Amino acid sequence: MKTHFFYWVSAFIVLYGTLQAQDQPTKPNKENKREKMEALRVGFITQELELSPTEAEKFWPIFNQYHNEQKQLRESYVGKKDGGDDEISADKQLEFEQKRLDLRKKYHAQFKTVLGEQKLSKLYDSERRFRERALQQLKKRREMRDPNTAPRTPRHNPAPR
């Protein structure tokens, strides 16, 4: 049963990618990349959590809402930079981290109801690993595109990636 579900998710991702490839001339490139990234995230988390169809049906609407609220929080935080400067005050960083924690607590109970304790722990770990892998791939692509450029020095950004 789990194997069949994995094949269906994989087929969806492949089909989704094929349809997106046909639509590329009409959509901006940045939007295409964002949609592809979301499809990869769905596939990765579904596989990592080994979600049953019933669990997936209940889980994804909650997760998408959580993800959208995280995105809005990050965007509002980036908009609060003082004077257009890259530096953000320590107070605002602390405020952001508290709001981020409050948001996580808000959805924790809902996720726990749908997934259970064990899969919930896997969820947080899977999100982190997905971000790390995505950043590694981005770094590799940049290096392949222009191997002569020096690696970028990471700037301090307490916002979630």
Image (cartoon, rainbow, N blue to C red):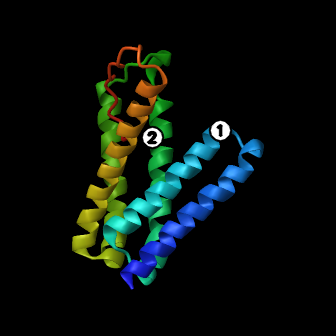
In the image, residue 56 above or below residue 154: below
Q: Residue furthest bottom?
A: 1
Residue type beneath disc 2: Arg
Q: Position of residue 5 (x, y in %)?
A: 44, 78
SS at circle 2? helix
In the picture, residue 24 is in which quadrant? top right
The residue under the point 32% across, 75% down is 115
In the image, residue 77 above or below residue 85: below
In the picture, residue 152 is in which quadrant? top left
**Residue 115 visible in image:** yes
Residue in the foreground of this view, choosing between 86 and 122: 122
> Which quarter of the image is occupied by the C terminus?
top left
Q: Which mark is residue 29?
A: 1
The residue under the point 47% across, 31% down is 78
SS at circle 1? helix
The residue under the point 32% across, 33% down is 158
Q: Position of residue 64 (x, y in %)?
A: 49, 61
Q: Which residue is mark 2?
A: 74
Residue type beneath disc 1: Asn
User: Dot 2, crowdedness within 10 Å: few (<14), some or many (≥20)?
Assistant: some
> Which quarter of the image is occupied by the N terminus?
bottom left
User: In this rendering, which labeled residue sits more in front, label 2 or label 1?
Assistant: 1
Label 2 or label 1, whichever comes before in sequence order: 1
